[in-house]
Amino acid sequence: MIDVEHWAEIRRLHFVVGLSIKEICRRTGRNRSTVRRAVRSQGPPSYRRPPIASKLDPHKEEIHRLLGAEPRMPATRIRELIAEGGYAGGQTILDVYLREVRPLFAPPPRTFSRTLYRPGEICQFDLWEPSKLIPVGYDQERRGWVVVACLGYSRAGAGALIFSKSAPDILTGIVRCLGRLGGLPATLVWDREGALHAGAGRPTEPFAALCGRLRLGWYLCEAADPQAKGVVERLQGYIETSFEPGRSFANELDFQDQLDAWFAKANARTHRRLRCRPLDRLPEDLAAMAPLPAESPDLDPRIVLRVAPDPFVRVDTNDYSLDPRLVGRRVEVRVGLRQITAVALDTGEIAAQHRRSYARHRTISDLEHLRLLKSRRGGPTEPAVEQRPLARYDALIPA
């Protein structure tokens, strides 16, 4: 048998140079039958090993029957069953064969069409949970989530850290992300998050109220269909591999600052799918999006209570002090992501202003509140301390 190079040379001599088979035999030293086969063949020579019977051949019908009854049956279980029928081969040849024939018995796989988005059309959202707990001060750590937003056209993203999956926190994260992106898209795309989905594809009242206030549409994906919001899913995967590894955080504020800085860098990178930077497409998105409202929607939960003789209010396991002069009067406590504010309902007096703490089981008191509380209890006053002239001490201490 000749190799491909000699086969091509024989054909060149015959068809290009015009030599006879006899002359080619004289020049190449090949016999006449070899030269004649090379001239008559339509393809280059190749070595073909004669087929060898496989140990699986007697059991293929049984394998097909098992896959027809249960297409997802594991290969190890199939080997156990055909071994009862005399199969003595290894697992490897069975695995190779199953990779070829299993798709013939499995239901057809789902296919996807490429989706193109117009500027300002949608913004996809998702909740991402960091793999590590977030430091919140006082040697405590807490579970947190990040509301991740991604515009469909430009792929520009933003994120907001929250510490619960309640509707007020998620909606506040949505508003913050839209503020970072700079505009209002036509439609917000979410999966069926419990705080936003009321069932049967309907939004909850808080989510619908926010969309109505901002004049936005919404779309809630079908159950178990993350591909419907694949743009934000890919961004979330990028966060997991690029933002989180190798970072440490002092507290929740430091986490948010580092996240904002990372998004600014990510939006300025060249997107592999778009072949351009999201920052370059963002102006087109913003031109088609509605402007942000002059005032951000008020989404903070309220607590209305009557100030007890022990003037504190409990928010998320922490006790925050209230003005003791308002004991017995009704106040409204506004619970924000960053601040706790209380106002008297009858006069509008400020009852408390505290920075919200996400550490647990702490008592947070205003110094002025403690002083007023102590004076109203009528407790003993601080003893008066005599202040002597320094000359007396100089006289008592020998030089």
Image: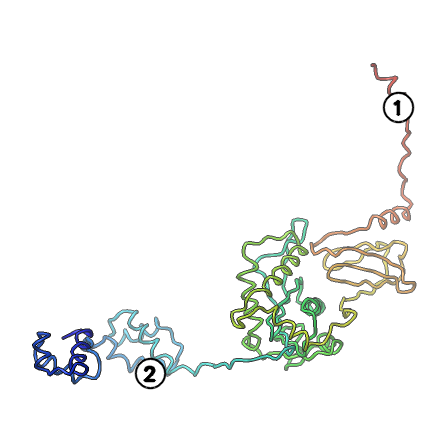
Dot 2 amino acid type: Arg
Looking at the picture, how far across and down is residue 344, in whole percent?
88, 62
Per the rendering, the mark at residue 46 is: none
Query: Which of the 4 quarters of the picture holds residue 143?
Result: bottom right
User: Can residue 368 be seen at all in this image of the molecule?
Assistant: yes
Camera-near label (2 vs 1) is 1
- Kindly state the secondary structure of the residue where label 2 is placed: helix
Looking at the picture, how far across and down is residue 275, in whole percent?
53, 71
The residue carrying pointer 2 sits among few (fewer than 14), some (14 to 19) or many (20 or more) residues within 10 Å by Cα, namely few
Dot 1 amino acid type: Leu
Q: Is residue 101 left or right of residue 221?
A: left
Query: Disc 2 to disc 1, how far (Cα)?
Result: 107 Å
Looking at the picture, how far across and down is residue 190, in whole percent?
63, 75
User: Can residue 52 be seen at all in this image of the molecule?
Assistant: no
Q: Residue furthest front?
A: 17
In this view of the protein, which residue sits in the foreground, 111 or 258? 258
**What residue does disc 2 label?**
65
Count how many numbered circles sit on residues in the image: 2
- Kindly state the secondary structure of the residue where label 1 is placed: helix
The residue carrying pointer 1 sits among few (fewer than 14), some (14 to 19) or many (20 or more) residues within 10 Å by Cα, namely few
Q: Which residue shows up at 72% across the image and 55% down it?
A: 357
Q: Is residue 29 left or right of residue 129?
A: left
Per the rendering, the mark at residue 390 is: 1
Q: Is residue 8 left or right of residue 133?
A: left
Identify the image quadrant of the C terminus. Answer: top right
On screen, residue 141 above or below 384:
below
Q: Which residue shows up at 89% across the image and 43% down it?
A: 379
